[in-house]
Image (cartoon, grey):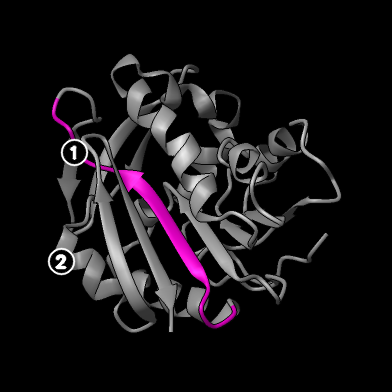
Amino acid sequence: MVELKSRSTTPHLEKYYARRASEYEKVYEKPERQLELAWLKTRVPELLRGRTVLEVACGTGYWTQFIAKEARQVYACDINEPVLEIAREKALPASKVHFFRADAVSLDGVPAGCNAAFAGFWWSHVKNDDLSRFVANLGARLERGSQVVVLDNCYVEGSSTPISRRDEDGNTYQRRLLSTGEEYEVLKNFPTHGELADAVRPIAREARLESLQYYWLLVFTLR
C-alpha cells in the first residue's frame, strides 16, 4: 500500500464520507437517473479502454468495477479507509485493480506510468481556490497524451439536494442527512461549461463536454 504523505485538504468532507460509507451507493438508486447511469456505465469504460487508469477519489469502488472491465490496469485512490474497505470487498481482480490511500487534491504517492485518469463526482467537491492546484497536480502525474474523464452532477430542481448557501469565494453547499440522523454541510459545486473549459485549459490539448440531464462528462487529452 502506498503511504499517505499529506493531510486532507477537505477534513469536513472526509469525515462526512467516512460516516456515509455504508450508504454511499444509494445515490445511484434514484429512478429518474437510471437511463443515464446505464449509458454512463458503458460510456466511461469505453473511453478508458486499454489504458492504465488513475481513479481519483474512488470511494467504494462503484465506478472502478465498470472501468476495470475495459482498462489495462486501475490504480484507485481515496483518502478514506472506510470506503476503501468496501471497495476492496468487490469481486475485482487483484492483479488488475489496486486500491490505495491518497489525498485527491495533492495526489502525493500516486504511481507513475498512468496514461489515463477518471474522477467521478469529485470535481464538485473541490473548492474553487483548490481547483487549479488539483488540475495541475493531475496533469503532472500522468503521461503526456493521457485521456482524462471527469464525471459529475448537473443541478436539477426536484432531483438534486437544494443548495443551502454560497460562500464569498462562490462555493456552494448542501445539507446532507445520513440514515443515523447526523447532518452535515457538504461542499457541492455545479460549474458552468465555461468554468470547466477555463479550468482544464492549462493542461488540455483538446476537450469536449458530453452533457446529459442529470450528469456531465468532461473528456480531455493532456498536452
Question: Label 2, on which residue?
Answer: 194
Q: Earlier in the sequence, mark 2 or mark 1?
A: 1
- Amino acid type of the residue that numbered disc 1 sits on in the rendered structure: Ile
Q: Residues within 10 Å of mark 2 (few under 14, many from 20)?
A: few
Q: Nearer the viewer, mark 2 or mark 1?
A: 2
Please give left or right for residue 181 compared with residue 158 in the image.
right
Query: Could you say whether the residue bearing mark 1 is in a helix, strand or loop?
Result: strand
Q: Left or right of 97: which side holds 51?
A: left
| Residue 186, image x, y percentages | 35, 43
* Residue beneath the point at 55% across and 55% down: 48
Q: Which stretch appears magenta?
A: 143-157
With 212 as the anchor, is 53 left or right in this view? right
Instruction: Give x and y (percent) for residue 221.
Output: 42, 73
State which quarter of the image contains the N terminus. Answer: bottom right
Q: Nearer the viewer, residue 136 or 21?
A: 136
Q: Mark 1 — residue?
A: 163
At mark 2, the secondary structure is helix
Q: Position of residue 22 (x, y in %)?
A: 60, 25
Residue 87 found in image quarter: top right
Q: Is residue 217 visible?
A: yes
Amino acid on which disc 2 is placed: Gly
